[in-house]
Structures are given as structure tokens and as C-alpha cells.
Image (spheres, grey):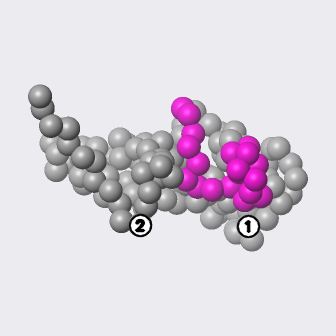
Amino acid sequence: MAKRRRQPRIPGTSARTTQRRVDSFLGHCLLRASLSAVKGDSRLAAAYAVVGGTPKASRVAAFVALWATALIDLDVDVLGIEEYGEWASESTRTAYRRLADFRALWPEYDTPNELALLLVQAAQKQGSRRPEPSLAVAL
């Protein structure tokens, strides 16, 4: 009979209370950014794609989380890019640059409204008023 391998445990965590969040929103952004950056089919090319895609994925995840926070603060369900820029005290060009990064990773959406609403709903389920970027999103 084969001996079962024990899973490594992260120090300071409990097996009962720790739940791995493999499908976090940031993880989805990272996957999309990495897939768009792949140039080749080797492991090295894949590693470069992950490293190269991480900054953009982080920026997009933060942008959507801020968009969700704006939805909560302004108490609306839909937000335009100009309204977001005004709320965030960003110039119009910066707001549109962030939107362009978002659209590069999530081309099926014009604005982050739908994804931000998912973050808001998940935050409300957890009893929090602020959305969390590590939200598990079913795609």
C-alpha cells in the first residue's frame, strides 16, 4: 500500500481554518495578463510572462477594487469613467489610462461596473463595507 504524501503546512495556520483562495480576483487578472504576454512555448517564456504581467494585473485589480469602493461611496450601481476620475481625484487622462489597462485584460467589459458589483456583493456577504481585491470570482 502506497504511503500518502502529507501536504506542506504554512506556519501559523490551521488546516481547519485555512482555505486556499486559488480563484481570487487578483489571480484572474494575473492569469489574463500572463496569457496576453506569452511569447513562445517554453517554461522560461511562461515565467517571463508571469513576471511581466504581474504589475499590470495588480494595477487592474486595484482599479476594479477602487471602482467598487466608488460605487459604495456614491451609492450607485453604475459609474462612468469621468465620475470615477472625479471621485478618485485623478485626471481624465489617468482615469482613461487605467480603463485602457482594464480593457486589455477584460475585453468583454466596457467598464468595470459588473466586476465591481461582484466585489461589492461579496463584501456585503462577508459583512464588510469595503470590497476586497482577493474576492473569489466565478468566471
93 to the left or right of 7: right
Looking at the image, the residue that sits furthest to the right is 75
Q: Vertically, is 94 above or below 20?
A: below
> Which residue position is annotated with label 1?
88
Give the structural element (helix, strand or loop) at label 1: helix
118 to the left or right of 59: right
**Where is residue 77 drawn, in percent x and y?**
82, 44
> What residue sits 86% from the left and 57% below the top?
74
Query: Which residues are drawn in magenta?
Result: 121-139
> What residue sits 39% from the left and 57% below the top?
54
**Where is residue 34 drawn, in percent x and y?**
35, 47
Q: Earlier in the sequence, mark 2 or mark 1?
A: 2
Q: Which mark is residue 12?
A: 2
Image label count: 2
Assign the N terminus to one quadrant of the image.
top left
User: Which SS type dominates the magenta stretch?
Assistant: loop
Give the structural element (helix, strand or loop) at label 2: loop
Foreground disc of the pair 2, 1? 2
**Where is residue 63 drawn, in percent x and y?**
61, 57
| Closer-to-camera residue (71/37) | 71
Residue 125 on the magenta span:
yes
Whether pointer 2 and pointer 1 mark residues with C-beta atoms closer than 8 Å, the reply is no
**Where is residue 128 drawn, in percent x and y?**
74, 57
Give the Cα distance between marks 2 and 1. 37 Å
Q: Vertically, is 125 above or below 130?
A: above
| Closer-to-camera residue (39/34) | 34
Q: Amino acid at mark 2?
A: Gly
Q: Vertically, is 41 above or below 134?
A: above
- Estimate how packed mark 1 is, as few (under 14), some (14 to 19) or many (20 or more) residues with alpha carbons within 10 Å: some
> What residue sits 73% from the left and 67% below the top?
88
